[in-house]
Image: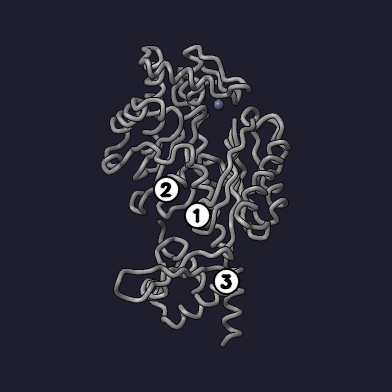
Amino acid sequence: MNGLPTDRSPANTILRLVAAGVVSSRAQAARVTGMARSTIGLHVDQMLRDGVLAETEEPQGARGRPAKELTIGKGAGYVVDVIFDRTNTCVAISDASAAIVDSRVIEILLNPDPEAVLQRVFEAADELLAGHGLELADIRQVIASVPAPVDFHKGVTAHRTIMAGWERIQIAGILSEHFECPALMDNDANLMALGAATTLHADELPLLHLQLSTGIGAGLITSDAKIHRGADGSAGDIGHLRIDSRSEARCQCGKVGCIGAYASLHAVMSQLGIERGTDADPRSDRKALMQLVRRADPAATAALRDAAVHLGHLTAILVDMFNPRTIVLGGAMVELSDDVLSTIRGVVYQEAMSIATRRLVISPSRLGNKAALVGAARLGADELLEASPRTVAHVVRHADAVR
Ligand SMILES: [Zn+2]
């Protein structure tokens, strides 16, 4: 997806190319990197001995010898991904090529008992590891996703309602201690954006990903395929912007007139008099709204279209600000009705500058509720390969000793 690193050690470069699926043989590695076959052979052999790479015999066609295919080995390490969400939490193991090895969904409410949630996360991770013959030492990175603003540098979140009870919990610190490796925590909107970016080509970036659900969030992926977090990690927290100065809707943040208070799924549901889901059935409100939409209920159709017009105004401003090549719209509002996407698209093309919309593509998410997990796996793989000079330094030392 992104450009190839040029300032890496040869072993790290080969490892990255194999992880990215660009290279699957020594001959290809030599062609792509321009390194001598003998140099490639030295590094590949050492990484095979260390288990960082694996080589499988792939029978070719009738002619020619069987080709050996290079893949990522167990020694490259694994990532534990923890996707915290309001009504359930997903725990997964992914590898250095960002492939999701296995995952489990834990049905547990995020509030009010963080310890119980973390306990279940640890149990699920143990089961996943055991199921794949992996040990704690194989885990080299943890990525956590939370549905709330994150101080990316401190690994903490604080949100009065979404993550009540978690304010003083050092989530990244606890995960790092438990899994005995580095842990990063990010906002789900950022990881969803990174996940969506994995479905695009490099020339389809920059990407603006909008998550339109019970809240409204945005993630921006730059043209070099990185998350734009801003100075403090809060870039993309757009749900509390005041777009319509006449609005007097009270927001859960305490302010009045936030776009999330009148154009989110919760706002639409409360306009229609739909009762919030209960702890026993947290999705009852969505189901009720879906039934209204399926019946083409005029009030539901109008409320969703109104919300989409507001979201269109917001998106048009973001388009002029960031000039993305692609916008991906995810979340329950887009899944509920095609009308939401087409309304937003219409407003954006009308209001944003034509230079910014001429080649702009606006499409629905292809990953659905997997977007944050796919993004976490991608970020985890990037961290593994970034950290792998440790592994690679070890490899290179070996190689020197061999000489
Ligand atoms: Zn607000």
Q: Amino acid at mark 3?
A: Val
Q: CA distance from mark 1 to mark 3?
A: 19 Å
Reading the image, the residue beneath label 1 is 98
Say whether residue 285 is visible. Answer: yes
Front residue of this view, candidates 166 and 115: 115
Q: Amino acid at mark 1?
A: Ala
Residue beneath the point at 58% across and 85% down: 402
Instruction: Count residues near mark 1 (Cα–Cα under 10 Å), then give few for <14, some for 14-19, many for 20+.
Output: many
Residue beneath the point at 37% across and 36% down: 364
The image quarter in which residue 251 lies: top right
Q: Secondary structure at mark 2?
A: helix
Residue 112 sits above or below residue 41 on the image: above
Q: Quadrant of the N terminus?
A: bottom left
- The reply, left or right, for residue 294 in relation to residue 385 is left
| Mark closest to the chain's N terminus, 2 or 3 | 2
Reading the image, the residue beneath label 3 is 392
